[in-house]
Image (cartoon, rainbow, N blue to C red):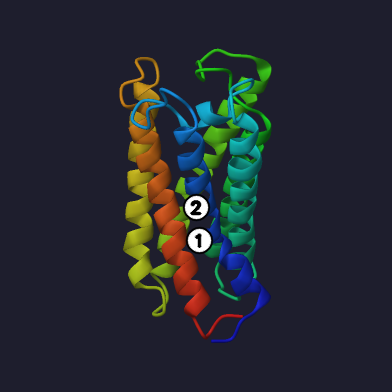
Amino acid sequence: MKITAAKILILGGIAGPVLFTLVTIICAALRPGYNHLYDFISELGASGTPNAVLMNSLGFIPGGLMFSLFGLGLLLSGYQGGKFKAGSVLIIVFGLGVATAGIFSCDVGCPINGTTEAVVHDRVSLVAFFSSITAMFLFGSSFKKTTSFHNLALYSKLSGAFTLLFLVIMILSYPSETLSGLWQRLMLGTIFLWSGVVAYRFALNRNLV
């Protein structure tokens, strides 16, 4: 397999999710009383909380930047099509959004109405999530037109649909905190799995740069 700069960047779609997930697990284990089913991941990086620096500096920021490199690698891969390129740019936006969410933290407990920093965190996160969802639908339409990635077309669209579903349920559960952590993890897990699958397929493809 020919190793190129684009393919190395694309591997960020695997490295980013793995790093973010590992740091989340470690930081959660270090936080007494933290519950993955009910608590948001952002609470691990909330301002003034124990190990917040660890979650933000080793999870959100580098994990997000790796996603952006993944999007950049796709953009440079040689794959043609306006929808594909637009999707790649949106993946870059998603990654930058995740990284920015690590710079602007939510308040303790991640309440709906918080400080200016927390409001920035929430809005940037929403932009990032919707960017990833739109990107997956765009990739789905783009992949449908080629033989090499035709089987990723339906998978991408389903991933976008499930990510949107989990996001909506998470937002609705926010006020009562009913399994909010679970819905967020299902949403992010869908994004992470999709990026890993696409990164793997592109890294192995011999016809791309």
* Residue closest to the eye, 104 or 145: 104
Q: Secondary structure at mark 1?
A: helix
Q: For this view, does 196 lie left or right of residue 104?
A: left
| Residue 148 in which image quadrant | bottom left
User: Which residue, given by chain and number where applicable, does mark 2 sit on?
Assistant: 17
Residue at (45, 65) in percent of width and height = 198
Q: Residue at x 51, y 36 (%)?
A: 27
Tell whether label 2 touches label 1 (CB within 8 Å).
yes
| Label 1: how many Cα within 10 Å (few below 14, some 14–19, many 20+) | many
Q: Amino acid at mark 2?
A: Pro
* Percent position of residue 114, x then y: 59, 14
Cα distance, mark 1 to mark 2? Answer: 6 Å
Residue 156 on image: x %, y %:
38, 58
Residue 44, placed above or below residue 9? above
Q: Residue at left 55%, top 69%?
A: 81
Is residue 168 shown left or right of residue 31? left
Residue 132 % position (x, y): 50, 48
The residue tagged 1 is: 14
